[in-house]
Image (cartoon, helix red, strand yellow):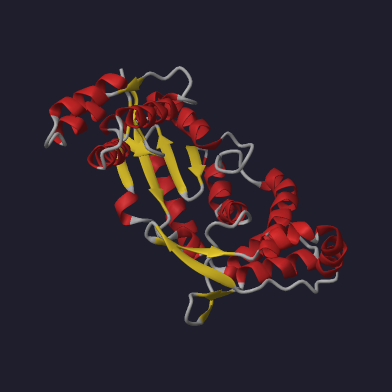
């Protein structure tokens, strides 16, 4: 990165000429493992080219993407999706919530480029996109050719992820059910069982066409009154709450800090920052804390006073 910055004035015209002449080639990536997943690291020059591609293609493709897709910059983000679902829960009786199993790793190149080709005809851009997809990764001992799936941690990947599920967005818009998507995670709300079944049929057809699978552990079909989790929140007809998994991760992290002997000031700062994040961006919806209270009671194993103190901070 520092070399690129130091020699940028010299490299810039060379890089522009290579990109425009379709002569630019992406280098092999380095594989780094962290938090249970593999992240592919691009070289500084490649990352710069990919960022430029993401900026240009986002401006070009975003008008063609559904307004019901919230994860791209300028679309409102996760909290906008949460507000949208919360505002429509009371008007619907049935819920279908799911996501794609191993989404990034499941993306088929031919299908993706077929979708891209409907909106992008520039040969130089298409050549760069193929280079971004068909890549080699150095895992420290050998070079691995990647023939399916897009790269984690790349600035271009969220846009490609949004575009790959555009057929689903289009089909759901034609169906007329309430629908919200955040990357590969989506919710369908329906007033009748018949409408819900039709939505499920559409999703199954699109998933088959795109050669991806729904995640069995993250798929829920039922009545809204039962409650459901989506994007770390819990939705019911009674209001908006915090998903139990979100609370579980929070209490595990606080417990780790406590066991590590971290001072109270640092724990208090973490708790307040987390609680500020939970409450921010959800508008006028009052968060119910029942899930948090129940989880904290069930996980008190040693110092009851400590958990009572954490609970008091969240009031």
Task: Please state the horizontal and vertical placement of residue 101, each as a whole percent of the image.
Answer: 40, 59
Task: Please state the horizontal and vertical placement of residue 262, each as a whole percent of the image.
Answer: 30, 37
22 relative to 176 in the view: left or right: right
Q: Quadrant of residue 187?
A: top left
3 relative to 281 in the view: left or right: right
> Which residue is most to the bottom?
142
* Quarter occupied by the C terminus: top left
Q: Nearer the viewer, residue 220 or 193?
A: 220
Looking at the image, can residue 150 be seen? no
**In the image, what residue occupies the spot 66% across and 73% down?**
27
Question: Compared to 37, does 24 lie above or below?
Answer: below
Task: Please state the horizontal and vertical placement of residue 148, each as a whole percent of the image.
Answer: 52, 71
**In the image, what residue occupies the spot 26% across and 26% down?**
310
Looking at the image, can residue 195 be seen? yes
113 relative to 68 in the view: left or right: right
Question: Compared to 83, does 53 lie above or below?
Answer: below
> Which residue is most to the left?
301
* Quarter occupied by the N terminus: bottom right
**In the image, what residue occupies the spot 37% across and 60% down?**
36
Q: Quadrant of residue 14?
A: bottom right
Q: Nearer the viewer, residue 190 or 157?
A: 157
**In the image, what residue occupies the spot 38% across and 18% down?**
286
Q: What is the number of callouts on the image?
A: 0
Task: Please state the horizontal and vertical placement of residue 201, each as a whole percent of the image.
Answer: 42, 52
Q: Nearer the viewer, residue 313 or 257?
A: 257
Question: Compared to 43, does 311 lie above or below?
Answer: above
Question: Compared to 201, does 298 lie above or below?
Answer: above
């Amino acid at each position: 990165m520092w070399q690129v910055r130091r020699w940028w004035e010299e490299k810039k015209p060379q890089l522009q000429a290579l990109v425009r002449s379709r002569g630019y080639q992406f280098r092999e990536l380095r594989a780094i493992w962290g938090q249970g997943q593999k992240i592919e690291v691009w070289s500084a020059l490649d990352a710069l080219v990919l960022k430029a591609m993401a900026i240009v293609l986002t401006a070009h493709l975003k008008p063609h993407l559904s307004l019901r897709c919230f994860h791209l910059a300028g679309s409102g983000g996760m909290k906008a999706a949460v507000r949208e679902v919360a505002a429509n829960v009371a008007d619907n009786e049935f819920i279908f919530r799911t996501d794609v199993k191993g989404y990034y790793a499941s993306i088929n190149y031919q299908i993706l480029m077929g979708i891209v080709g409907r909106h992008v005809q520039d040969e130089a851009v298409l050549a760069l996109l193929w280079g971004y997809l068909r890549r080699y990764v150095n895992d420290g001992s050998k070079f691995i050719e990647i023939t399916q799936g897009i790269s984690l941690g790349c600035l271009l990947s969220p846009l490609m992820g949004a575009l790959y599920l555009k057929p689903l967005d289009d089909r759901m818009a034609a169906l007329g059910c309430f629908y919200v998507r955040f990357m590969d995670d989506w919710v369908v709300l329906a007033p009748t069982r018949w409408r819900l079944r039709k939505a499920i049929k559409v999703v199954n057809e699109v998933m088959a066409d795109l050669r991806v699978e729904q995640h069995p552990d993250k798929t829920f079909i039922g009545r809204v009154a039962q409650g459901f989790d989506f994007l770390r929140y819990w939705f019911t007809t009674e209001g908006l709450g915090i998903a139990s998994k979100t609370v579980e991760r929070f209490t595990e992290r606080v417990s780790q800090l406590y066991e590590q002997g971290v001072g109270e000031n640092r724990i208090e700062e973490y708790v307040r920052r987390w609680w500020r994040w939970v409450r921010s961006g959800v508008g006028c919806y009052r968060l119910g804390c029942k899930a948090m209270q129940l989880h904290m009671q069930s996980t008190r194993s040693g110092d009851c006073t400590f958990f009572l103190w954490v609970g008091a901070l969240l009031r």
